[in-house]
Image: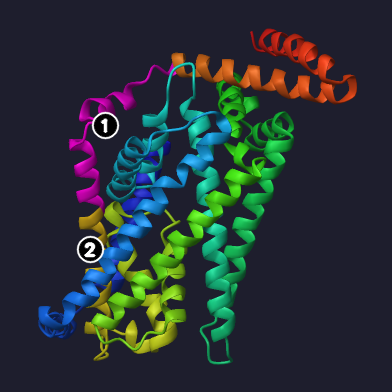
């Protein structure tokens, strides 16, 4: 049922955004003229610069995941990590309703070592940190642009974005410090305990295991390295939009490029259309309109052909890049189609049992650590063993 709702939302977003950006006959002529005006002799340096920056964003986005996995005891070789990430990014682009987010955790899962739930927790941290970074970019750009003539939606969007991702970070920290209390609160708020107690027990185990993936928030070194990779990733991403805009002779400042990137990033956190078709273009035009004026999004304005061509080619280049990188990863020795297909057929009971063992042992270690703080090093080891067995007994 939930999948059907997500698919309907995704298709609804596709229909709405395609309708918003689809040009009329006059707009199609402007679009064709804007594309014809691109001459490869003049355009290729900007295209090459954009692709180089896109490569930087791809590798930074892939490799930083190791710093989220390290605190839960996982270290993936760079080649395999790049292959898994490339396939995951391709899936995020290709699948509707953000279903592609589950591909990387499923591929990284290893029986007895790390569960898909814990790996999914690291993805949650990744998304929230990204959201905070991009919200700061958006808020700063909007604040520098704000005036009495600015669109009414501009500053509320900036405040809402900061508020949502800031609240999500607070939730992560609280869940890390008080996992059991957070899980109980989540289950109470969902009312699932009342209507489906058996499902609630499974969810309790899954959530406790997923909270293991928040462990990087305790690891200052890995958190700092992850933050540095993330800043490079987003800065390179913002400059890539600016470089490509120069190739279209759009008078877009660096600040405008970062603001446009931010609007797109916030916009695609909504239920995404398949391939982000229409959605990516609409939010790109919306971001451009803040710096190039309302003509950037007005279908009847002369500028619309150029801005739409920019949005289409920007999206098209990313689609080609992520499909190509995902395809190359599938051809490499690091990952295979059989492995990708097999990840969707993991035995749920087996996964739940594996999650339960991880969650119980972690709960035991946490209790042991708290007891050890009072009893000393020797007491920590002894109580850690006793409480780990108690945790397993409680779950049994």
Dot 1 crowding, Cα within 10 Å, few <14, some 14–19, many 20+: some
The residue that disc 1 covers is: 335
Compared to residue 78, the image places residue 262 above or below, namely below
x, y percentage for residue 366? Answer: 73, 24
Tell which of 395 and 360 is nearer to you.
360
x, y percentage for residue 155? Answer: 58, 77
Compared to residue 179, the image places residue 240 above or below, namely below
The residue at the point 64 percent across, 26 percent down is 193
Tell which of 78 and 240 is nearer to you.
78
Left/right of residue 323 with respect to residue 16 in the rendered view? left
Where residue 163 sits, quadrant-wise, is bottom right
Tell which of 62 and 16 is nearer to you.
62
Tell me where the magenta segment starts and ends, as one range.
Answer: 322-348
The residue at the point 22 percent across, 31 percent down is 333
Compared to residue 275, the image places residue 237 above or below, namely below
Q: Quadrant of the C terminus?
A: top right
Left/right of residue 131 with respect to residue 343 in the rendered view? right
Dot 2 crowding, Cα within 10 Å, few <14, some 14–19, many 20+: some
* Magenta segment includes 200: no
User: How far, Cα to Cα, is label 2 from label 1?
Assistant: 24 Å
Where residue 278 sits, quadrant-wise, is bottom left
The residue that disc 2 covers is: 317
Element marked by disc 2:
helix
Disc sitting over residue 348 in the figure: none
The dominant secondary structure in magenta is helix
x, y percentage for residue 20? Answer: 31, 72
Q: Quadrant of the N terminus?
A: top left
The residue at the point 48 percent across, 25 percent down is 115
Single out the mark in the foreground, 2 or 1.
Answer: 1
Element marked by disc 1:
loop
Tell which of 230 and 141 is nearer to you.
230
């Amino acid at each position: 049922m939930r999948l059907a709702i997500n698919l309907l939302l995704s298709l609804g977003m596709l229909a709405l955004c395609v309708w918003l950006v689809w040009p009329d006959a006059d707009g199609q002529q402007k679009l064709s003229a804007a594309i014809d005006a691109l001459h490869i002799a003049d355009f290729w340096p900007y295209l090459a610069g954009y692709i180089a920056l896109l490569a930087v964003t791809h590798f930074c986005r892939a490799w930083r995941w190791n710093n989220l996995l390290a605190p839960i005891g996982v270290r993936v070789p760079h080649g395999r990590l790049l292959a898994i990430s490339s396939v995951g990014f391709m899936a995020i682009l290709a699948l509707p309703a953000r279903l592609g987010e589950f591909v990387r955790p499923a591929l990284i899962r290893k029986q007895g070592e790390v569960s898909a739930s814990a790996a999914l927790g690291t993805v949650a941290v990744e998304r929230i940190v990204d959201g905070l970074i991009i919200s700061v970019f958006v808020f700063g750009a909007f604040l520098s642009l704000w005036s009495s003539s600015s669109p009414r939606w501009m500053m509320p969007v900036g405040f809402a974005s900061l508020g949502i991702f800031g609240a999500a970070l607070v939730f992560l920290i609280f869940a890390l410090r008080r996992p059991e209390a957070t899980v109980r609160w989540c289950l109470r708020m969902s009312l699932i305990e009342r209507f489906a107690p058996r499902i609630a027990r499974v969810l309790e185990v899954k959530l406790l295991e997923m909270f293991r993936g928040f462990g990087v928030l305790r690891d200052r070194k890995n958190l700092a390295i992850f933050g540095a990779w993330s800043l490079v990733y987003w800065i390179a991403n913002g400059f890539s939009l600016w470089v490509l805009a120069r190739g279209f002779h759009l008078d877009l400042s660096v600040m405008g490029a970062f603001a446009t990137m931010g609007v797109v990033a916030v916009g695609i956190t909504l239920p995404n259309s398949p391939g982000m078709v229409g959605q990516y273009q609409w939010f790109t035009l919306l971001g451009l309109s803040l710096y190039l004026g309302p003509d950037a999004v007005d279908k009847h304005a002369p500028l619309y052909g150029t801005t739409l061509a920019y949005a289409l080619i920007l999206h098209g280049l990313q689609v080609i890049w992520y499909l190509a990188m995902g395809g190359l990863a599938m051809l490499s020795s690091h990952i295979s189609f059989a492995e990708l297909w097999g990840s969707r057929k993991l035995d749920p009971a087996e996964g739940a049992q594996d999650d339960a063992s991880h969650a119980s042992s972690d709960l035991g270690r946490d209790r042991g650590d708290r007891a050890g703080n009072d009893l000393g090093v020797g007491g920590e080891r002894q109580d850690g063993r006793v409480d780990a067995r108690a945790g397993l007994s409680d779950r049994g």
